[in-house]
Image: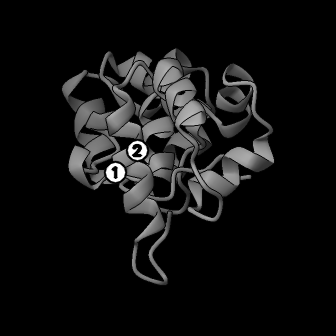
Amino acid sequence: MSRRVLRGFSADRLIDLREKAGLTRGELARVAEVSLGAVQSWETGRAMPQVDSLAKVAVGLNVSIDQIVLIEPEKRHIGDLRVMAGLTQPQLASRIALSTTSLSSIELGQASLSRDVAGRIAAALDLPVQTVVDAYERTRTRPPGTPA
């Protein structure tokens, strides 16, 4: 199970959005209810935010996560869809009545995605089922060594 944003996080974009919002690092930390050290680490590239923290930052900046995590919609993997919704694996798994282990295997492309589960994921993320299926296929057929 991974709670970390591994694909598409842009420290430069986070800095740009924070500065456009007129916030210091400390102010962003305060409004997003995260530590100043965390914001500093993300902006300097020493660490990446966890999904739930990133969701708080996006709210604090009044932006959507896809303005910070830069992955074109047609290149998103199934795990990216969850990240764009600001959900951790346990949160999404709970919403769709699936174990976190099973969801993780699907997000890695190591388990089959049934039409039923695709429908539940789509409903939980407020996306068309075909978007979920397409993202899963991109995940499943990605080249070796490519993060899911």
Q: Is residue 29 visible?
A: yes
**Which x, y percent locates residue 59?**
42, 17
Residue that appears at 63% across and 65% down = 110
Q: Which mark is residue 133?
A: 2
Q: Which mark is residue 76?
A: 1
Residue 57 vertical placement versus 101 (above, below): above
Q: Is residue 136 left or right of residue 128?
A: right
| Residue at x 34%, y 26% (from the top left corner) | 128
Task: Indicate the position of residue 20 as horizontal and vertical percent values.
Answer: 19, 27
Q: Residues within 10 Å of mark 1 (few under 14, many from 20)?
A: many
Q: On the image, which quarter does residue 7 sit in?
A: bottom left
> How many C-alpha atoms fall within 10 Å of the one at disc 2: few (<14), some, or many (≥20)?
many
Tell me the CA gap for discs 2 and 1: 11 Å
- Residue type at numbered disc 1: Arg
| SS at circle 2 | helix
Q: Position of residue 115 (x, y in %)?
A: 52, 37
Task: Name the residue furthest bottom.
Answer: 144
- Say if 61 sits above or below 9 in the image: above
Q: Is residue 2 visible?
A: no
Query: Can you say whether 37 is above or below 143 in the image?
Result: above
Depth check, front residue: 17 or 71: 71
Q: Nearer the viewer, mark 2 or mark 1?
A: 2
